[in-house]
Amino acid sequence: MSLGKLFGRSHGAPASAYPVAKSEEQWRCDLPPEAFHVLREHGTERAFTSPLNKEKRKGTFVCAACGQPLFDSATKFESGTGWPSFWQPIDGAVGSTIDRSFFMTRTEIHCSNCGGHLGHAFDDGPPPTGMRYCMNGAAMAFEPAEAGRDAATAPGRAVATFGAGCFWGVEQAFREVDGVLETAVGYAGGRVASPTYEQVCGDDTGHAEVVQVAYDPSRVGYEELLDLFFALHDPTQKDRQGADVGSQYRSVVFVETDAERAAAEAAVARHQARFRRPIVTEIAAARPFWKAEDYHQQYLEKRGMAPCHIR
Ligand SMILES: [Zn+2]
């Protein structure tokens, strides 16, 4: 008899009941061991071990398995327990089951998107809810607010995110544009928080290789960046660019606002005239951007190599 059965441990609904479903073997492969233990085996990390205990910045705590936003930093409080504690989850982000393990009756909390175990909820929390969501830091990742929208809205600075195949060459090309302040390569649009290059290239996390471009809108317009984006790759190829095959190489524009969406749609119409086949570029709402490993940043520039554009 397994320990789980001995303690009457509930493993919750079957994986297929959640929008993000994977086999336990796949989860084991995708998650660091500590995260796998908590999220998939209902484990509990040792108190005071998670760096998220001390996380005080403005931002969002997301599921480490699927990236779903779970808690706003405004609802975090210091409980003294050694586990990150919150008085309220984001609407619809978590589900609960009754957990009768270890001869106690507790309310178990899991991610509503992937079913991953996060921790427990108790009714001894602070106002306004009186609830204490006692979470495992290993089950979450933190996205600071200043890395996303806040940075984008700083005066004299806007941010655009493009996926146009292998991100090395795309980044190089955007760095040559007058008015571009900064670039970074990373992953966006997938289901896992903080993915690695190996995970993304395994083609099962759903992320695209993207370049995030910070630019000065008074020196270069979003439309001009879109024109370069369409000139850099073949937007009629679905889930590939030349020899690079897989959904991580898909053609995608992540837009932050309705105005950006309209500009991207207009750019598709403008560039369609150059192609016989339809443009398949995806125009998607902005998603968390996960910066790629350092060795991918300015990859070609550091090696003195020329970008290998398709077109
Ligand atoms: Zn999740």
Image (tube, helix red, strand yellow):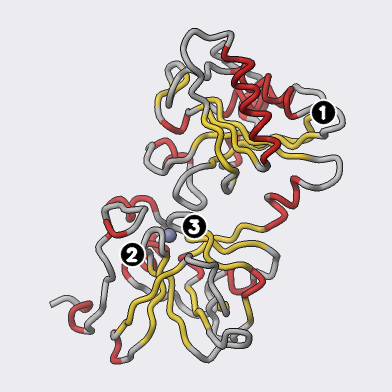
Q: Are marks 1 and 3 in contact (CB under 8 Å)?
A: no
- The total number of labels drawn is 3
Who is closer to the viewer here, 292 or 78? 78
Q: Secondary structure at mark 2?
A: helix
Residue at image location 48% in from the left, 65% down from the top: 93
Q: Amino acid at mark 1?
A: Gly
Tell me where residue 245 sits by quadrant.
top left
Earlier-in-chain disc, 1 versus 2: 2
Residue 197 in sight in this render = yes
Vertical order, 280 against 155 (above or below): above
Q: Amino acid at mark 3?
A: Gln
Q: Residue furthest left?
A: 1
Q: Amino acid at mark 2?
A: Arg
Who is closer to the viewer here, 255 or 306? 255
Between circles 2 and 3, the one closer to the viewer is: 3
- In the picture, measured across the screen, residue 177 lies left or right of residue 100, that is right
Residue at image location 59% in from the left, 32% down from the top: 253
- In the picture, measured across the screen, residue 38 lies left or right of residue 249, that is left
Residue 98, image x and y in percent? 32, 82
Between circles 1 and 3, the one closer to the viewer is: 3
The residue pinned by badge 3 equals 68
Is ligand 1 closer than 8 angstroms to the Cβ of mark 3?
A: yes
Vertical order, 154 against 100 (above or below): above
C-alpha separation, residue under disc 1 versus residue under disc 2: 46 Å
The residue pinned by badge 2 equals 40
Residue 306 in sight in this render = no
Q: Are marks 1 and 2 in contact (CB under 8 Å)?
A: no
- In the picture, measured across the screen, residue 96 lies left or right of residue 130, that is left
The residue pinned by badge 1 equals 179
Earlier-in-chain disc, 2 versus 3: 2
